[in-house]
Amino acid sequence: MGSLTYDRVVVEFDDRMLAHLQLVIIQKLRRGESFVLSWRDAAVVGDGRSSAWLHPAIPLYFKFSGGHAPTINPNWVAQLTRSANSSQGLVVTAEESAALDAHQTPRVEPAIGIRAATQTHKTKASVSEH
């Protein structure tokens, strides 16, 4: 499990998912664009939904647990980019949903956990299979 740390909030993602999110997030922030990142929380942290407003001026840290970069799926990156450019913002979705027609609703990822820590909030994301 890798993690994304943003303004004292730590969200855990699978390394493969995190690599794809990193590409899309950095692409938006390089253009100076703020946007919402949303994910489903893991059952261990309440099984709800969480969102964060990402702004280029706030430091962002990506931590991968594995030593090798995963192969990038350009279809998944394209789907996540479309989501990030929409009015709802970047919604974390499963890789399998990238194969769906662009007019269908993507499947939301499994839950991501969020836990409060001393000076940070730690969260864990997961992918839903709906």
Image (tube, grey):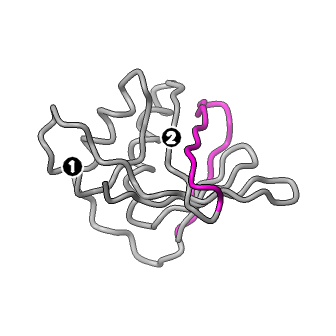
- Could you say which is closer to the camera, residue 67 or residue 110? 110
Left or right of 77: which side holds 52?
Answer: right
| 57 within the magenta span | yes
Which one is in front, 6 or 88? 88
The reply to whether discs 2 and 1 touch (Cβ–Cβ < 8 Å) is no
* Residue 93 is one of the magenta-drawn residues: no
Seen as rendered, the residue at the extreme left is 101
Residue 99, relative to residue 13: is it above or below?
above
Residue at the bottom extreme, as displayed: 67
- Residue 89 placement: quadrant: top left
Instruction: Give the residue type that dot 2 points to.
Output: Ser
Residue at image point 43% right, 36% down? 90
Residue 20 horizontal/vertical position (percent): 37, 53
On screen, residue 35 versus residue 73, left or right, reads right
Magenta stretch bounds: 45-64
Quarter of the image with the C terminus in it: bottom left
Query: Residue tagged by mark 2?
Result: 38
* Residue 94: percent from left, percent from top: 32, 55
* Residue drawn at 57 percent across, 55 percent down: 47
Q: What residue is shown with label 1?
A: 98
